[in-house]
Amino acid sequence: MKSLKYILFACLITVLAVSCRKGLDPINYVDPGPDLEPPVVVITDPTDGKVVVTTDSVGVATFKFAASDDIELKSVTVTFDGTVLASYTSFTDYRRMAQNLVYNHLLDGNHTLTVNAVDQTDKSTTKTVNFKKVTAPPYDPMEGEVIYLPFDGSYLNYIGYTMAGVVGTPGFAPGKKNDAYAGATDAYVTYPSAGVVGDEFSFAFWIKINPTPLRSGVVVIGPPGTGSDADRKFGLRMFREGTATKQNIGLNVGIGTVDVWNNPFTIVTVSEDWVHIALAISPSYIKIYVNGDTVTGLALKSKIDWTGCNSISIASGQPTFTIWEHFSDLSLYDEMHFFNRTITAEDVQKLYNLTKK
């Protein structure tokens, strides 16, 4: 038996030796050609103009970037506010590197991040992003409050400190309290509706109406589509329309089988004044408040059907309610609160009184 084992082992060694001599898997050098292109640098986080919000005055940021070259990288240098944070000269893949660099001393203010890559023939590429860091003040939410958007220079939800999504290039302007969202053409804010909408649901906010364009979406939570008859059987659409001097603010909701209207629930004379609007939604009724007072209501034969309504659009009917050109709103929005319960008249008065002056 031992003899058989030795014979098999010897055969294996012979096969390996012959394979090596014959070069069954040769590694041949391939000339990569001349180095014609400069390196490519991409910074994915932070993006240019981003506002980094933390609850601590000294924050932690993760800078995400990549560099590549057609032939071979020589070095990659990362500079933060003029100071070199890291320099790389050795790469696992000599043509490409991707890195997450943690920086744990981020202070409030404006900052500049620069990434410079150099190839073996000393061609270089530099990318720079400018961003801002702010400290969010502590916030004590009301019962059932799940989103609070103060729009104080950022799109941060102060409950959970997550950022709302932004489409287009809206901005900020002096608001009812500190800054406010300033609408722009083809711009709006989005937020996931999961955990927010339900049988009970409410929201309240301040708006200073810009009647140009003459109609727009205000708060829209609808299924994918354009707001056609079938689409409007689901979700909620608050909108405005009218003239340069008077704007009707209306509401449409879907209860699964039909859609229900209250249009207008209020008429606003266009001026420099801010208007406070609140909706308190239950399975059978919607109470509508303007400037702290109940102005009307909407009886529901059935609760709102939220099927397919996955996202909240603020300051536009897009992308789900565009059938009558209720596109983006150039108005100002401020102090926006969303609740996963039916708020009371006392709650509305509290929200109104906090910022009415």
Image (cartoon, grey):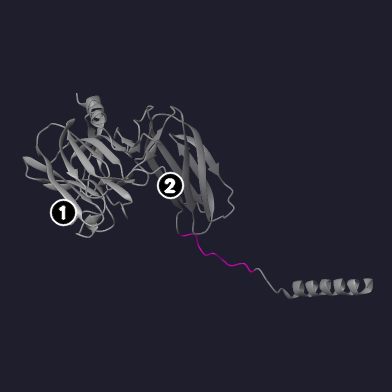
Front-most of 70 and 257? 257
Front-most of 66 and 94? 66
Taking 223 as reference, is 104 above or below it?
A: above
Quarter holding the C terminus is: top left
Q: Residue 332, how many percent across, how many down? A: 20, 37
Q: Amino acid at mark 2?
A: Ile
Q: Is residue 101 left or right of residue 54?
A: right
Taking 252 as reference, is 62 above or below it?
A: above
Is residue 120 among what the camera can see?
no
Q: Which mark is residue 43?
A: 2
Q: Is residue 53 left or right of residue 21?
A: left
Q: Is residue 21 left or right of residue 119?
A: right
Q: Residue 73, how many percent across, how many down? A: 53, 52
The residue at 21%/47% (across/down) is 300
Segment colored magenta: 28-36
Front-most of 247 and 119? 247
